Amino acid sequence: MKKFFFHAGLFFLCFALPLQIAAAMTVRFDQKISVNGNPIALVKVQSKADLMKAESEFQGMKLILVHNAKGTFSYSPLQKQAAKLPKAVEKTNLTAQLPHYLEFLEKNKAVKTGTETLEGRECDVYTFIEPVIRREAKAWIWREKKFPLKIEVASPGGATLIELINIQFDPQMKDADFELPGDVKVIEIPDTFAPPPPPNAGPVKTEKKPAAHS
């Protein structure tokens, strides 16, 4: 049972759920995730300051990821059991900085490469090296809201595309929405279960183009 919950937690974490939300933002949105053009999941996310809840299905079973002051939990409503994930695992996600993504891009020396319009929203496009898996990435930032609408990452498992849709800012939420039901049994996963660094996690090497001669 521990193994199931551990892998279920990794499914959410590796596919970019915003666990470490530090900015005072309340937002609800859906994440469409695909790898190599194949749909993987539709994750429904809601966050309030440093609280987060995400719902999806994995291998035919509904899973809920909850992050609150007590920790981060992968919860199966059907089995009424939850796994408390190690802190080392909490950090392995691609969109941890959603509410202040421009600061995240600046910190990681992102380069603005142009502008595009997505669904009528003007976006600034940036390229950068994703700091967790050390792979090339590209982000489309909604200029008006300073919030990402699309992220592409050349992850070890293939070209990963994350699209944020149905975005609602400042919806009504209660802190109680981010708590586990009282009848849920919690299993604590020890830190020794934390995943190893991703393969080929070294810096990405880029070839320098020769300078043009006049």
Image (cartoon, rainbow, N blue to C red):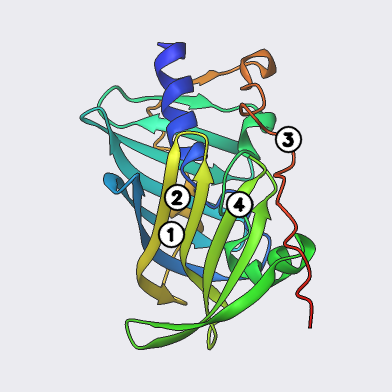
* Residue in the image at 69% along x and 30% along y: 88
- Residue 53's label in the rendered image is 2
The first of marks 2 and 3 along the sequence is 2
Location of mark 1 (residue): 46
The reply to whether callout 1 and callout 2 are in contact (CB within 8 Å) is yes
Q: CA distance from mark 2 to mark 3?
A: 32 Å
Q: CA distance from mark 2 to mark 4?
A: 28 Å
Q: Position of residue 98 (x, y in %)?
A: 58, 63
The reply to whether callout 1 and callout 3 are in contact (CB within 8 Å) is no
* Residue in the image at 61% along x and 38% along y: 92
Residue 185 in view here: no
**Extreme-left residue of the structure:** 60
Q: Position of residue 118 (x, y in %)?
A: 37, 80
For the residue marked with disc 3, what is the amino acid?
Gly
The first of marks 4 and 1 along the sequence is 1
Q: Nearer the viewer, residue 66 or 173?
A: 66
Q: CA distance from mark 4 to mark 1?
A: 27 Å
Q: Position of residue 99 (x, y in %)?
A: 60, 68
Between label 4 and label 1, give the one nearer the viewer. 4
For the residue marked with disc 2, what is the amino acid?
Lys
